Image: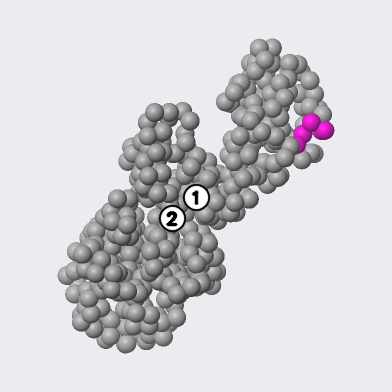
Amino acid sequence: MHILDDFAWRGLIQDSTGTDSLRESIDAGRMTFYVGFDPTAVSLHVGHLMQVLTARRLQLAGLRPLLLVGGATGQIGDPKEAGERSLNPPEVVAGWVEKIRAQVSPFVTYDGDNAAVPVNNLDWTSELSVVDFLRDVGKHFPISKMLARDVVKSRLDAGISFTEFSYQLLQSHDYFELNRRHGCTLQFGGSDQWGNITAGVDYIRRRTGEHVHAFVTPLVTKADGTKFGKTEGGAVWLDPELTSPYAFYQFWLNSGDSDVVRYLKYFSFKSHEEIAELETATAEKPAARLAQKALAEELTTLLHGEEETRNVVAASQALFGRGELAELPEATLRAALVEAGLAEIHKPGVTVAEAMKEAGVVASLGEARRAAKEGGAYLNNVRVSDSEAVIDPSDLLHGKYGVIRRGKKTVAGVEVVG
């Protein structure tokens, strides 16, 4: 199947400068594209995965990727409706550039005829003098078009700095430079970048007369319209120091039945037939959550590797009595318990009932006693009948962790400190 037909089936193209002409250019032979990421934080989040994985699909189809991390534009920031951005120090942005460049590396290959090329727009932007920028770049941008952008119009009354107003020129110039230096003829990004991206297409036409291509992917939302990529703890990051592999896995595992098939089309590399089978399974046996498990395992493996995925799958099962807790690495166990709810206990000789209350699986010591009496109290997957039994240090995993479970589904953890 042609890559553009696959994209159409998956719903990956919301707007474009023309898929017919893009198809002709792809079919004509070697084609280079770029996608950009601004280092406005220490890590990318799951919202960026749409672009990262789309780049992977295009490379697998034979196109050459240029992965731009904006060492220049990251110091400016694209205008946002909420108000003026705080400018980060250049040395901070430079550090984030390297971190983000490392994060996107596992998703593409840097070998072969269409090897990916990392680029940084600071390389050419830092060479521009103010006069050169105004003469060679600024003169090609009609103010009326720049003012027509929704985000700019929304900021005019409250105020928008010339710095943020000029962001569009910098991004457009990136496309021009990548076209000049690498023969790049396709840019894509998220739908919120459509105005910036088409401005770059128009800039290249005005400056060189060449026709280049662009498309944008849709904004990913949940079925209820709420923001994708957020949990109670905040954004779901790609950096394992900010979002553990276990929490990343759980994010996808917790996808709603009304969302998961769409997410599979957007994020999975499974075939159309495999996704159709998972769609049927979701409709017929939703409790099995086969689609969610398939998506979570695939994406966790892509980002964190096979071994880490095996660990988090084992932890996910072991917490509910379907695996050996003692075999879990400490880091994986702790991440799983943090996700479930982990309480610190600074008291020697804590009882099972006290641990259950501290962990939050019961509301009171009396409720803990009743749960134990009814056979529904567990410590590290071992049923406890005596709620007043003191937890021995030898009963704790890695010498300090206790997995506390009430019944089959209510799980949390305690960490006995000191």
331 within the magenta span? no
396 within the magenta span? yes
Residue 30 visible in the shown view: yes
Which residue is pictured at 61% across the width and 25% down the height? 361
Q: Disc 2 designates what residue? A: 49
Residue 299's disc number = 1
Q: Is residue 324 left or right of residue 48?
A: right
- Position in image of residue 375 (x %, y %): 67, 15
Q: CA distance from mark 2 to mark 1?
A: 10 Å
Q: Amino acid at mark 2?
A: Leu
Discs 2, 1 touching: Cβ within 8 Å: yes
- Position in image of residue 388 (x %, y %): 76, 18
Quarter-wise, where is residue 36 in the image?
A: bottom left
Q: Count up the numbered dots.
A: 2
Determine whether 38 is above or below 274 in the image: below
Q: Residue furthest left?
A: 144
The magenta segment: 393-397
